[in-house]
Amino acid sequence: MLSAYAARFSPDDPLSALEVGEQPEPEVHPGWELVTVRAAALNHHDLWSLRGVGIKEEQLPMILGGDAAGVTADGREVVCHGVVAGVDGMGNDMDPNTRFSLFSEHHPGTHAERLAVPSVNLVDKPAELSFVEAACLPVAYLTAYRMLFVQGGFRPGETVLVQGAGGGVSTAAILLGRAAGLRIWVTSRSQEKADRAVELGAHEAFESGARLPARVDGVLETVGRATWEHSLKSVRNQGTVVVAGMTSGDPSPAGLPHLFFRQIRVIGSTMGTRAELRDLITFMAASGVRPLVDDTYPLAEARTAYERMAEGELFGKLVLVNE
């Protein structure tokens, strides 16, 4: 079957490790189902996999991708939760002691014509969402949902700063936060991305590192080193910084005086549970909020999509489609 996969590792030139070609059909384990993939979104996790982060050489070739929406053998339209709980996929994803992995880490990923998925990971796709829209949800939008409403616990009327406009998680946070009644502020180094963020629903946009008019109730932090100090300075006393990534590297120093003198809460967040994905899908269908898609590409043109993601000049998600 046609797939986009890591054939080797290349830390400095990840695209040179990407191949698009035939791979064996997925093995369907007991308790798993075969899904014909109709759409699968790209995430920066896929570029890290090509660099050799999260998988071992003996696992190569590894089909990439963590997001997917498709159709089961009996015709059910589904969204595939990307977190595999337990070695066999049957684990309790509410138990913090359960071993977790993402598709493309221990099990083949979603950038293929077909995908084997634990039955418990299949969530019904509502008619209100297209396959392309639904395929954007399991990684970036679920990450943003958990950051805002589960780990952050932010409430309508509170102000939340989203660091770095344009990325998948930050775009999702703008759309979801605005729909839930939060006041959303964003930062960006690009005036064009800042303007687009406001068009999308952000209440205010600021240059990266700029002094804000007031301290915020919370910060969503996925950038890391480039924005960490600004995040700590921008949140109010006893406010909350939710961290789900560090695309610019690990921050140093940690800013400990801000943390203990001002009693700031720092909370880690990764992806979300199956129940949270169901809640997110219900929220999207009922509210009318839809994922922002930058562009779609046929699976056969996956390399072009990966090249665009590596360039970084995106606003919204890139999605591979199977007709």
Image (cartoon, rainbow, N blue to C red):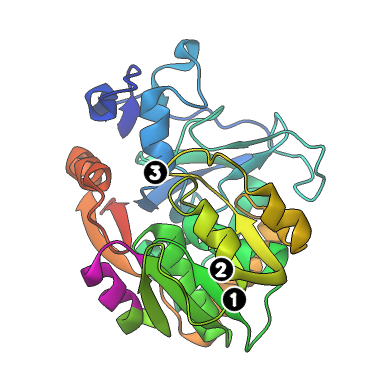
Q: Which of disc 1 and disc 2 is earlier in sequence?
A: 1
The answer to whether residue 15 of the structure is visible from this angle is: yes
The crowd level at tag 3 (other Cα within 10 Å; few <14, some 14-19, many 20+) is some
Q: Return the residue nearer the eye: 273 or 162.
A: 162
The answer for how far apart the CA atoms under marks 1 and 3 are is: 28 Å
Q: Which of disc 3 and disc 1 is earlier in sequence?
A: 3
The answer for how far apart the CA atoms under marks 2 and 3 are is: 27 Å
The answer for how far apart the CA atoms under marks 2 and 1 are is: 6 Å
The crowd level at tag 2 (other Cα within 10 Å; few <14, some 14-19, many 20+) is many
Amino acid carrying label 2: it is: Ser
Discs 2, 1 touching: Cβ within 8 Å: yes
Q: Secondary structure at mark 2?
A: helix
Instruction: Give the number of the disc on residue 234.
Output: 2
Amino acid carrying label 1: it is: Val
Q: Please, what is the dominant secondary structure of the magenta stretch?
A: helix
- Identify residue for label 1: 216
Left or right: 87, with 129 as reference point: right
Quarter of the image where one finds residue 240: bottom right
The verdict on residue 196 being magenta is yes
Instruction: Give the number of the disc on residue 44.
Output: 3
**Segment colored magenta:** 188-197
- Residue drawn at the location 41% of the way across and 76% of the way down: 290
The verdict on residue 245 being magenta is no
